[in-house]
Image (cartoon, rainbow, N blue to C red):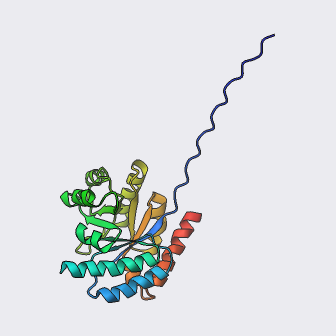
Amino acid sequence: MSKKSKRPKKPPEPKPQARPAPSLYLVAPTPTDPAAFGAMLESALEGGAVACVLVAPAQGDAGRVRKTLEQWTMIARRHDAALIAVADSTAIVAAGADGAHVRGPGPDLAEAVAALKPDHIVGASGLKTRHDAMEAGELDIDYLMFGEPAPDGWTPPHAETLERVEWWAEIFNVPCVAFATAFDEIGPLVAAGADFIALGDLVWKDPRGPAEAVRSALVHLRATVSA
């Protein structure tokens, strides 16, 4: 009597990987007093876990820009945060900062990628159209930011940022940073698929101080993730 041939076992279905919990990304204004801003940055980072800080040092002498970035980088690293700068690639490398942020599509973004990758972070914002975002995403950048205020202060409507985040997160693998202008915008942006939540004046102009603002943002962030 012949033995029945054993059917090969069906391999188990791969489990979907859990999406990492989103993190905070602070966007700082261009300070008039670098030392005073350093104290504000220290305070903000004492409020809780922040993944990245975006700074834009005032234009000026290259040596002064480098020294300023060095000081801010040291503060960020004490709190395990990456310091990203809107600055010349040479200054970023010389200061030991973690990367560059380029506002707007075009040759500046491609040049930053060529000069800094793979040892440094390169991110982009100011991408007004889907086409701009897709072209930037093809350049081996580390993240795209949606919803950041324009240089003149105009901020995209929350609904527009939400729509762009949902579209990007559904199709592309490059991490997405979503800008929130109010604490109650954090939850919807996380639900839409944002990997990082960017905060600007919501932190720096909070009358309670930047540390309390960061604590409040983390409460909203964790409530959304655990829901």
Q: Residue 150: percent from the left, percent from the top?
A: 26, 70
Q: Residue 203: percent from the left, percent from the top?
A: 41, 80
Q: Is residue 227 visible from the viewing direction of this image?
A: no
**For the view shown, which residue lies furthest in the right direction?**
1
The foreground one among 15 and 83 is 83
Q: Quadrant of the N terminus?
A: top right
Q: Residue 96: percent from the left, percent from the top?
A: 33, 72
Q: Residue 134: percent from the left, percent from the top?
A: 30, 51
Task: Give the mark count.
Answer: 0
180 sits to left or right of 115: right
Name which residue lies at 52% across and 59% down: 20
The foreground one among 166 and 145 is 145
Q: Is residue 214 visible from the viewing direction of this image?
A: yes
52 sits to left or right of 109: right
205 versus 110 height, above or below = below
The foreground one among 77 and 55 is 77
Name which residue lies at 44% across and 60% down: 194
Residue 198 location, quadrant? bottom left
**For the view shown, which residue lies furthest in the front direction?**
94
Name which residue lies at 30% across and 85% down: 34
